[in-house]
Amino acid sequence: MKTKISIAAFAVLAFPSSLLAPLWAQTSSPVKPLTIEAIYAPGGLGGRSPETMEWSPDGTKLSFVQRDDEGEHGELWYVDAATGEKKILVSAAKLASLAPDNNKVKDEREKERLTRYHVAAYLWDPDSKHLIFDSQGQLWLFDLATSTAVQFTSAPDPSGDPKFSPDARHVSYVRKHNLYVRPVSGDGEKQLTKDAGDDLFNGDIDWVYAEELAVRSNYFWSPNSKDIVFLHMDETKVPTYPITNWIPTHPTVDEEKYPKVGDANPVVKLGVVDADKGNGKVRWISLTSDEEAYIPRFGWVRDGVIWAEVLNRTQDKMDLFFVDAKSGKSTKVLTEATPGAWINVNDDFQILKSGDRFLWSSWRDGHTHLYLYSFDKQNPLAAEAKLESQLTKGDFEVMGVEGMDEAAGTVFFSSNKDDPRQRHLFSIKLDGTGLQQLTHDEGIYSSTFSQDGKHYEQTFLGPTTAPRMSLCAVGGACAPVWQARDEVAEYGLRAPKFLEFKAEDGTTLYGRLLLPPDAQVIGKIPLIVNIYGGPAGQTVLKEPTSPFDEILTRKGFAIFSVDNRGTPGRDRKFQTAIRHEFGAIELKDQLTALDQLFAQYPQLDQDRIAIWGWSNGGSMTLYAMTHSERFRAGVAVAPVTDQVNYDTIYTERYMGLLKDDPTGYEGSDVTKGAANLHGALLLVHGTGDDNVHFQNSVQMIDALIKAGKQFRLMIYPNKTHSIAGSDARDHLFHMIEEHLERELK
């Protein structure tokens, strides 16, 4: 069970407006008091960072939205790639209606959809002359030459996921699960698909594909702008989960389509529709007779030829198909299989512009690396693809392909080479030579490349330096785009100590420890363990310290985290150690690291230990408190308590199918250990959580009551998985702080 909200990534938790908001400090004498209210105030401690970074297709401009902390004033800026000069592209007065602040959205689930899944507020056209804005379901076309906006859609139902055709003559979009297209001139909207009802999706995305396969769009234009290939999803057999709003006198219920472990998934197939005719005729493509298969990625090889990935339900085998768009004939050109493990779906598959080669990533040698394949350009369906070479090799993970300069024969990728706790940008030639590290400061780098691969936006987070954004030329200089407010240093945040431990099998485990500022003089120090522990997130990264951790240390606590086996960023053996179970291996590693920590730091008090976490970290908190007597207190926020309550794609990826391993599922059900609860528990959940359902905590409450166990409970009405908003966050983190102080002191 997961969330993209790991407790170690408190950058996200503490600053919902930006990954960059939590900051560092370079002074041990803070000038400003650090408070929970300051952390969760609009803009956080560091100020609101740029939003919706986008490159113009011609590669000359990097655009972004910059708002003030309150979100009341925002402008669309661009940075000139050649000069580094910043200018306003769309004024605040116009942007207010074209791209309103997502934080002003009242509906908690809609706000989460916009922010969690990074729904773009605007899109460049292929000629870099127009923008299309999605303003709360209505599309607006903005002419950069005249700085004028024209409303492009006006239907009562919202339109979303807009795309320009490659020739810039049409705009497509999704409305009520169907595809539409309209000329840029605004004349004559055409409905391309005509299914009725809420169970049939054409080009639209359901919850489980968005959350667990990171799907952000389910339709794509052909290069010649004539056809659109889309994913059709039939959700008729997918069960629903009721999300109840208890606030009105007469509560309302929203039925969410959500396949839990063992349930029917959406049945999927590809369709191709002629964008010019708009007659509703669809050419259907059948790639497999397996109704339980997933199609996580697809697109165009070239005009007339489609590529598609087909993943089996157990997610240990993926086939890559090339398909004739007219006849529907297909050829399996590559099969990736990982017996005893799983396939990591990503966006690394890329067709080179030469039209006869593609990139592919795999951890077939035990690490995630890049491979180069070739195929017959004239007849892509003629035969299987040929492996040309393995581009990257070594004891490290390729985290993702970031860009490509095919003219220079160079691929750019993110990797944790030399230190799993860092992320750096690298380049390598398509012949496998010339590996270069392009970033060097200790920390976490991410980047977004222009289409030609000549420039990139670079975001940097370090444990002791100010977060910053820059525009860089490959092989050249970087120009500053944004940097967090300097006065954040006045709060006195400190970097943790980074530590190493050994699991019982000798595997290295990485940890971090933040001691109180006066640790030398306060005697025995109570310890708080921040845990995530699952496959979706690392907690030990060379990034800024959580401000909430700093607050707790100033109250005399030490804060500790360790990444157990099963967390990402390491080799296949490390990650797959938890295959077919959740809890046992993770807790064993946590306790082993704790024993070694106490040996290294005897000033830590072994009799006063607390544990807390969010989502998977909440689940691990409950597992630890029911399978160990080491913890005096704990806080479990939004936990999965029984794995069968969570969705198919995520859970079955790691646990396998329920029918194949009922014992493994039973062993990971923490409600069955309720009678063994040891320590003072605070259980927290939002009733509007559409990710980890409130049902999980209800079942845990029921089990604890039946076991005669006392505990504390906090429910946040209508709040989603992130329990977002200044009021809710202030309330929650004060409650966590008070619980830990009361139980450990």
Image: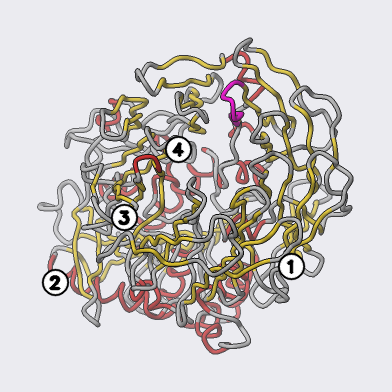
**Crowd around label 4: few <14 · some 14–19 · many ≥20 (10 Å):** many
Q: Is residue 434 left or right of residue 520?
A: right
**Crowd around label 1: few <14 · some 14–19 · many ≥20 (10 Å):** some
Q: Is residue 739 left or right of residue 237?
A: left
- Marked residue nearer the N-terminal end (4 or 2): 4
Q: Up-down: is 527 above or below 123? A: below
Q: Residue at x 62, y 12 (%)?
A: 147
Q: Nearer the viewer, mark 3 or mark 2?
A: 3
User: In the rendered structure, are the residues bearing label 3 and label 4 in contact, judged by CB atoms less than 8 Å apart?
Assistant: no
Q: Which residue is mark 2?
A: 599
The amino acid beneath tag 2 is Ala
Foreground: 268 or 53?
Answer: 268
Q: Nearer the viewer, mark 4 or mark 2?
A: 4
Q: Nearer the viewer, mark 1 or mark 4?
A: 1
Q: Which residues are magenta?
A: 123-129
Mark 1 to mark 3 CA distance (whole Å): 36 Å
Q: Which residue is mark 4?
A: 18
The amino acid beneath tag 3 is Asp
Mark 4 to mark 2 CA distance (whole Å): 38 Å
Main SS category, magenta section: loop
Mark 1 to mark 4 CA distance (whole Å): 42 Å
Determine which of the numbered discs, if any, sits on residue 286 in the image: 1
Mark 3 to mark 4 CA distance (whole Å): 38 Å
User: In the rendered structure, are the residues bearing label 1 and label 3 in contact, judged by CB atoms less than 8 Å apart?
Assistant: no
> Is residue 744 visible from the viewing direction of this image?
no
- Point out residue 384 in the picture as x, y percentages from the top left corner: 53, 69
The amino acid beneath tag 4 is Ser
- Marked residue nearer the N-terminal end (1 or 2): 1
Foreground: 628 or 291?
Answer: 291
